[in-house]
Amino acid sequence: MGFIWRDSYSIGNASIDAEHQQLFKLADAFFNADDQQKKTECAIRLFKYTREHFDHEEQLMRDMGYPEFPAHAQQHTQLISRLNEVSEKIANNTLSHSELKAFLTAWLVGHIVTFDTRLSAYVRQADASKP
Ligand SMILES: [Fe+2]
């Protein structure tokens, strides 16, 4: 199994959608990393990219006055702390493949397909009201 982007995940903002696609690629590479060193590299790459992406997404939500912003930002904070736990487990060599899969599925992909797609209606509405 892999992490494959679907068009139905898009929220209608080109740069956020491109970043989400990149996150799927990073998740897929992470899932397929077969040794400690590759896993460490993937975790670092995912961490950096996720931080930058969350900054962009949170800025967009603030700009639009998105009403679910606090709850959504809270999810981002939790995801970052889960990612830290995953990185620690890689360092201690105690991360099982099923745990990694659960993290990537529930937290990363799950976040994009549930929380981020909820932004979609808002983004499209904001676009439609532009002069
Ligand atoms: Fe998000």
Image (cartoon, rainbow, N blue to C red):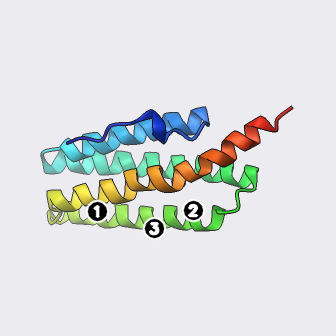
Mark 1: which secondary structure? Answer: helix
Taking the spot 41% from the left edge, 67% from the top edge, the residue there is 81
| Coordinates of residue 56 in the picture (x, y in percent) | 60, 46
Which quadrant: the C terminus? top right
Mark 2 Cα shell of 10 Å, populated few (<14), some (14-19), many (≥20): many
Q: Can residue 20 be seen?
A: yes
Q: Count neighbours of disc 3 (C-alpha within 10 A) and say few if under 14, some if 14 to 19, many if 20 or more.
A: few
Q: Amino acid at mark 1?
A: Val
**What amino acid type is highlighted by mark number 2?**
His
Residue at image mark 1: 86
* Distance CA(mark 2)–CA(mark 1): 21 Å
**Secondary structure under badge 3?**
helix
Residue 131 vs residue 46, the one in the foreground: 131
| Residue at mark 2 to residue at mark 3: CA–CA distance | 10 Å
Q: How many marks?
A: 3
Tell us which disc is closer to us: 3 or 1. Answer: 3
Q: Amino acid at mark 3?
A: Gln
Where residue 35 appears, x then y in whole percent? 12, 47
- Residue matched to label 2: 72
Is the CB of mark 2 within 8 Å of ligand 1?
yes
Q: CA distance from mark 3 to mark 1?
A: 12 Å
Q: Is residue 27 left or right of residue 15?
A: left
33 vs 12, left or right, is left
